Image (spheres, rainbow, N blue to C red):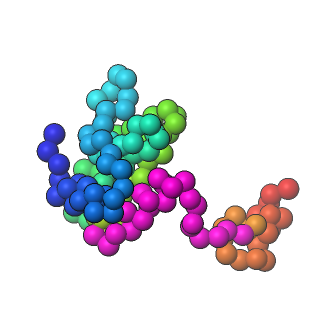
Amino acid sequence: MRKSSLETSFANQIRLAGLPEPLAEYRFHPTRRWRFDFAYPDLKLAIEIEGGIWRRGRHNRASGFVRDAEKYNEAAIAGWRVLRIPTNMVEDGTGLVYLERALEGKDDGPETTDDGGLGNPDLGDAALGVQ
């Protein structure tokens, strides 16, 4: 299978950052032909480079979206974490930051509040109907 230029760029970023090199085009399912663009099988961590999202590529047409949902759901059931990295996150380096965090096992994301992460302290659990 041919690597896209985005996948090549992301692989180069991984290498330059000194991160462990993932396996490319990793087939994760025992009976389906699904592959992850990159994978760390021992960590059950996968990376999918989502190109073509602004050009009505395969991933955002109805049939492609449904097939991707099936693939990602099966991966989740099998215990995989899947990082979905669109074009802009490859280009601006955000995708690499997500990968670094996933490899380190850190959760340095935004803090959430008891309002379900809505950012409004007046909307506590009671306001959301949570008992």
Left or right: 55 with respect to 73? left
Does the stretch in magenta take in 97?
yes
Pinpoint residue 66: horizontal percent, then vertical percent.
Answer: 37, 43
The residue depicted at 28 percent of the width and 29 percent of the height is 33
Residue range (magenta): 91-113
The residue depicted at 30 percent of the width and 41 percent of the height is 23
* Corner quadrant of residue 88: bottom left
* Viewer-side residue, 50 vs 58: 50
Pinpoint residue 87: horizontal percent, then vertical percent.
Answer: 28, 64
Pinpoint residue 39: horizontal percent, then vertical percent.
Answer: 36, 43
The residue depicted at 35 percent of the width and 22 percent of the height is 31
Left or right: 60 with respect to 98? left
Residue 119 in view, yes or no: yes
Residue 70 in view, yes or no: no
Relative height, residue 79 to residue 130 (above, below): above
* Viewer-side residue, 122 vs 78: 78
* Viewer-side residue, 72 vs 104: 104
- Quadrant of the rendering where the N terminus is positioned: top left
- Quadrant of the rendering where the C terminus is positioned: bottom right
Does the stretch in magenta take in 63?
no
Relative height, residue 63 to residue 97 (above, below): above
* Corner quadrant of residue 126: bottom right
Q: Looking at the image, which residue sits at the far front?
A: 18
The residue depicted at 44 percent of the width and 59 percent of the height is 100
Q: Looking at the image, which residue sits at the far left?
A: 2
Pinpoint residue 25: horizontal percent, then vertical percent.
Answer: 26, 40
